[in-house]
Image: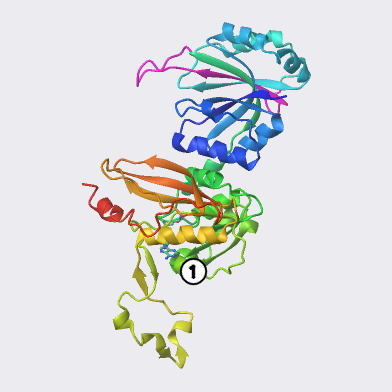
Amino acid sequence: MAKKYLVYMAQVHTNFRKAELESLADLHNITSIDFDKYDDNSPFLLVELENDKQAIDWIKRSILTRAIYEYWGEGQDLESLHKNIQSQPSFGHYKTLYQNDTFKFDFETYRGASKMNRIKQIESFAYLNFQGKISLKSPQQVYTVIEEYQPISDNLSSTVPIKMYFGRLVQHGDRVAVEKYDLKKRPYKGTTSFEAELSLVSANIAQVKPGTIMYDPFAGTGSFLCAGGHYGAIVIGSDIDGRMIRGKGASQNIATNFKYYKESSRFLDVLTMDFTHNSLRSNLAIDTILCDPPYGIRESIKVLGAKDPERFAGKENVEIDGEKAFLRRDYIPTKKPYALDSLLDDVLQYASERLPIGGRLAFWMPTANDENVETIVPLHANLELKYNCVQEFNKWSRRLLVYINRGPDYHGETNSGLSRTANFRDRYFNNFN
Ligand SMILES: C[S@@+](CC[C@H](N)C(=O)[O-])C[C@H]1O[C@@H](n2cnc3c(N)ncnc32)[C@H](O)[C@@H]1O
């Protein structure tokens, strides 16, 4: 029989929250959740699940969820909360089920702070008649009162809750990972490093799975590789810029980051490679692609090749000390500029060829916030565009695009070859005026 659970989410990155919860539910084949009840403006979501195991599986790696509780009831104030708890059909069952377990009470507040006497509040739950000992350090059960407040104004918070929930804690989300992977503490990072919270969320929406291979073709300092490693994937990265791959010496590179997180076993390798001249063998099973392609802002978009083929003609045969120059380890190949639209088309095509059916491609794409310019998202006939989650800045936004490989029978819309993002770089450097 289905049970009620209360999800208490962080009120941050709300454009990404539902996608994260849906993706994690899908990852664990949980189909009973009615996402129509989800509201970006509220941190609460009441759902039905089969049991605690489902709740644990679903929420334990969620970055944007604080916790999930077995739902015992709710009310406008303490009195109505108690009445509601005792009127729930599962009340008698729940009360006896955990009666002899050690326990403690906890309080969570949303948009306010209580002035109520917490001891008195706890005592008002005496009718639950718990027989177990109180344990503040390692209780078997944590009962939580969650209070929601309505601030009086922008600067004035209220001390009287508008709503109270009561539940038994089943599972915390994974917000501690945001601290763990905080860029401030990371040994190797650079100007292109992607913040911890949204890189972890991206990996969740991309459904990065333990024991599978995740590839970041524009790895830079390896932010998404770290996120993939956190979820147990075996990660591989590449970047055209060898300096990124080599890092800042033996103690500051992508591998040392994995050592720092004690996740070295998940780091397969990184290589210096132009994505458009991809040398990963074609039967290497890549389960997920997660990346932040170059936008031409902090780094240039370049591919192998001569900018001016006429001037380069004949130089491919240059020899140094009797050896072809391009075969020497110190050879730096010529590079030429490339359009972001073409690169994104290449990424979609690569994903359609390399991902398994159902595998996900997720990448970030910048867009200007011009009201009169339509944002055109790249599309490929084999890929279903599943999510388009926007993070707004002042004059521009970036969006996480998530695609599922549906294979050649999908026949989706395509816009390959179209100019979609061409003016972003110029608009950025002209301050979007
Ligand atoms: C936005 S950055 C990615 C940053 C990365 N997520 C990190 O954590 O540092 C894009 C990267 O793409 C690389 N890049 C540009 N053109 C490339 C190409 N043709 N093939 C592979 N990498 C390329 C750049 O050198 C840069 O490191």
Picture layout, residue 176 above or below residue 83: below
Q: How is the image coloured?
A: rainbow
Q: Is residue 404 above or below residue 254?
A: above
Q: Which residues are magenta?
A: 135-161
Is residue 248 visible in the rendered image? The answer is no
| The N terminus sits in image quarter | top right
Secondary structure, mark 1, is: strand
Q: Residue furthest left?
A: 433
Residue located beneath label 1 in the image? 272
Which residue is located at x 62 percent, y 49 percent? 209
Q: Is residue 57 left or right of residue 132?
A: left
Residue 28 appears in view: yes
> Vertical placement of 13 versus 136: above or below?
below
- Mark 1 CB within 8 Å of ligand 1: no
Query: Quadrant of the rendered structure where residue 416 is?
Result: bottom left
Q: Amino acid at mark 1?
A: Thr
| Outermost bottom residue | 322
* 282 inside magenta stretch: no
Q: Viewer-proximal residue, 287 or 227?
A: 287
Vertically, is 174 above or below 237? above
Q: Residues within 10 Å of mark 1 (few under 14, many from 20)?
A: some
Measured as percent of width and height from the top left, residue 240 is found at 44, 67
